Image (cartoon, rainbow, N blue to C red):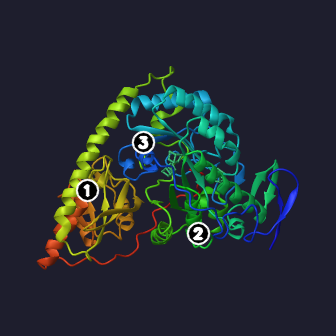
Amino acid sequence: MSARLPALDGPAVEATPAANCTFARGCGDALAPVSAPPADAVERARNHPCYSAEAHHHFARMHVAVAPACNIQCHYCNRKHDCANESRPGVVSERLTPDEAVRKVLAVAARVPQLAVVGIAGPGDPLADPRRTFEVLERVSRAVPDLQLCLSTNGLALPEHVERIASLGVRHVTVTVNMMDPEVGERIYPWVIWNRRRVRGRAASLILSARQLEGIERLREKGILCKVNSVVIPGVNDGHLPEVSRTVKRLGAFVHNVMPLLSAPEHGTHYGLTGQRGPSAAELEEVQRACENDARVMRHCRQCRADAVGLLGEDRGQAFALASLPPEPAQDLSEVRAAYRSAVERRRERLEEARREATARAAAVDPALGARVAVATRGEGLVNQHFGHAREFLVYDVTRTGARLVGHRKVEQYCLGGEGEEDALAVALRAIGDCHAVLVARVGSCPKGQLRAAGIEPVTEHAFEPIEAAALGWLAGLAARVARGEARAPVPRREPAHSADTAGSCAA
Ligand code: CLF
Ligand code: SF4
């Protein structure tokens, strides 16, 4: 198989994909030697809610939607659709000018002390027309210098902009890489715009992949922390993503975010309209596990809107709509954020101490005993939310050595104004149907009974404890009950209902 390709500059060239082509350097394993992420990578990820699962309990991000244009087409994207209540990439309620974006950042920074990161993630590609993106980054970095700057791109225009990105002080860049094999690529990308021309078919994917991998390498050379996002598309790239993981890790990517395709007909995407489904929770877990053999894998992504504000999993964007912003730029309160960061460090010490103590207490638990638990949390790393108030549950696999985040499950809020909604309860029971217990701050008697009937133990004994310590404490208690013959050792449960009810995806 060969393809007629437009060269990076100049005339079209002939290339043979997957053999010795100059574009698809990621095909096969004949790659540059492994490049380690920057030496201070872990420290730099520490307070970024996307690069560190632990940080996402404490720190918030905001996106400013200043980049409407895109230079490629993905079969999972339709940026025309918008719903204020919907959380998925590419969706925005308002597109901002640079002036509006800076005003919004200052307003959020003044009211959200958890804010640590300002990102540009669409609704199109931030580098397709980079002037606004760079103007906003420059102005935000001057106005609020303690905030980290972040960028998310499809990578097509990345290589030539890495120098500028670095000079602006951007230390975190996400590149969405769904394939390196053009045969896979042509089922995801119908076209890319290259040298002002629309390129279709495998040639489009060859160009895109080469540019993505080159961009990741250049980011590494500039000491910028790179995250790679991949959308799992069953039957298209699910079997290919471990190879992507291997390659991007070799090129210096710090973490691989393996996330599900969100697909439904009502969003008007090619995939949604042609019946391409997203992965089930179990399928997603399987791909994440396969990728984890080679790279650090992110499991806490919430596939945010391009105008999201707040902790991951909560969205306060509506509270900061343009019409509700103060007319004058808000005063920057960097000292409030500095005090918050110090408080987080003290909180982290307490969480770590609690984890150590709980692990010591669980040391006698049978190493073969393991369970899956759902947790209701409002943040701070604690079990601190009422079952009926949860809009999502974090899911952990727990053994005596610790609790490992598996992912999150979106649900509808069950308790509204004191009344429970039967439909919402049914959704929640399905969403956490593979869990053996749910750890919550409180739970009403009706849902408690239904949880028990569904074989999910409602647990309030560990309310307001740190999540990992609470999960270990519950496991130790379960082990004691099993030893006394009062409970049976858990066995893996059925797969939960797929919680994704939305379509589309984007660069973030
Ligand atoms: Fe935004 Fe993306 Fe930066 Fe995070 S989101 S630009 S890296 S600040 Fe985060 Fe949202 Fe997942 Fe993106 S949870 S979609 S990974
Ligand atoms: Fe462009 Fe992102 Fe949409 Fe793909 S998902 S077409 S990169 S805006």
Q: Residue at x 53, y 31 (%)?
A: 141
| First-in-chain label (1 vs 3) | 3
Q: Residue at x 27, y 49 (%)?
A: 418
Using the image, tell me which numbered label, if any, was put on residue 440: 1
Three-letter residue code for mark 1 = Val
Circle 2 or circle 1, nearest the eye: 2
Three-letter residue code for mark 3 = Ala
> Could you say which quadrant of the image residue 204 lies in?
bottom right
What x and y, as percent, mark residue 274? 66, 67
Residue wearing tag 2: 243
Say if 418 sits above or below 470 in the image.
Answer: above
| First-in-chain label (2 vs 1) | 2
Residue found farthest to the front? 33
- Please tell me whether mark 2 sits on a helix, a strand or a loop: helix
Using the image, tell me which numbered label, if any, was put on residue 165: none
- Please tell me whether mark 1 sits on a helix, a strand or a loop: loop
Residue wearing tag 3: 60
